[in-house]
Amino acid sequence: MNLKITERIVLLGPCPPPDDGTSVPFKLLVEYLEKNAKAEIEVVNVAARHNAGKRSSFIRDIVFLLRISAVTIGELSKGGTLFIYGSRRFISAVGALYSLVYSGVFKGKTVIYIAGGYFDEYLRVKNRLMRKAIIACLKRAAAVGVQTKAVFGNLREMLQNSVYVPNWIDVSALPVNMEPQGNNDLSELSSKDKRTVRLLFIGEVIPEKGIIDLLSAYNEAREILKGDNVALTLDIFGPTKDESEAIVLRKIVEASDVIYHGQVRHELLMRLLQRFDALVLPTRFPTEGYPGVILEAMAMRMPVIATRQRGILELIEDGFNGLLCGAGNVEELKQAILKLAMDMELVRKMGKRAREKAEKFDINIVLGQLCKSFGLEC
């Protein structure tokens, strides 16, 4: 699967702000290509509608699409490779069409990267005509990168130009949490001593991400740990949504030793992560790919408690480099929290193994392979 090397790469994707699961990897991609690709890089930001802080609407989305289309066409008229990065919805609605138009009208080359871990299922539930149209457009691309092995396995028969390219992080830029907090042996604590175990949640603060499940499990675990002189704290980072904000914030206020920080810039958040012992991400979304926040926590030698969702199962080996529980299963989540809180030596061992796993997703390894698969000279 070789592309003719071009002198220009037009990158279409979401630039921060906001810092989220697609914009942060896209920013790293842009920086990597600007540094390593033997090409002129032009970026078309498709996150402009989010920057405005307004709710999406049909008319606003049409105006947004027309605006980025005008900018993209202007860039593509100069030639080069079109590199489209986005979520399953963006690729289906915009990326596939651009691939068809650029290859048909401009006779140019297109490469596509689909973030997340659900594109195969997303296609499956589309009506037959729509599914065939999307696939036909994507086949015009020189390469279509997908984030998980599960998606790649289900797509490769219908989309022979698909390649497996996992999510990426900049391991070298992340501080390493060398030691978990507190003593690892409860027998060393006197009756007056208390060890604090600090938990962390990062993501959209909505029920679908498991925040209500986490608060329930946290409250129950906290009461149990009081008898063992272990204090449990929870810090929450991420944006809320209007439709669930009131109930989520009420649950946070009702809990003890829980701090809600809101959305914090990615660079600052990465510096703060080393203060914590474990990341908890009990997401209910079946669409999870390889969440960047999980990879970043693992790179900092921080074990992760997460749910058995498709992409996450490819990252976390239960009991080895993290702990898994059923989505929506508060009892399993509570037991996982207790298991880590009562055994800091286990936290240390899992953290070391997590780091070893995360190193495989370093930007220099993954994006080097991406360039090779996409035919880009880097």
Image (cartoon, rainbow, N blue to C red):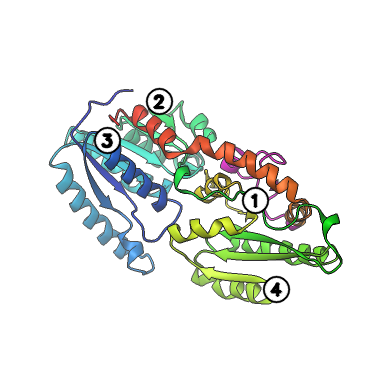
Quadrant where the C terminus lies? top left
| Dot placed on the residue nearer the N-terminal end, 2 or 3 | 3
Question: Is residue 274 in the magenta section?
Answer: no
| Dot placed on the residue nearer the N-terminal end, 2 or 1 | 2
Q: Is residue 63 above or below residue 140?
A: below
Q: Secondary structure at mark 4?
A: loop
- Where residue 160 is drawn, which disc sits there? 2
Q: Position of residue 361 (x, y in %)?
A: 49, 38
Callout 2 amino acid: Gln
What range is drawn magenta here?
A: 304-330
Q: Counting other residues with Cα less than 10 Å from the Cα at mark 1, is it few (<14), some (14-19), or many (20 or more)?
A: some
Disc number lying in front (2 or 1)? 1
Q: Is residue 282 left or right of residue 106?
A: right
Q: Counting other residues with Cα less than 10 Å from the Cα at mark 3, is it few (<14), some (14-19), or many (20 or more)?
A: some
Q: Is residue 233 above or below residue 351?
A: below
Instruction: Give the residue displayed 27% in from the left and 44% down from the top.
Output: 11
Callout 1 amino acid: Glu
Query: Which quadrant holds residue 202?
Result: bottom right
Question: Is residue 321 in the magenta section?
Answer: yes
CB within 8 Å, label 2 to label 1: no
Q: Is residue 9 left or right of residue 348?
A: left
Instruction: Give the residue displayed 35% in from the left and 43% down from the top.
Output: 29
Callout 4 amino acid: Ser
Query: Which quadrant holds residue 312?
Result: top right
In the rendered image, which residue does mark 4 sit on? 256
In the rendered image, which residue does mark 3 sit on? 37
In the rendered image, which residue does mark 1 sit on? 179
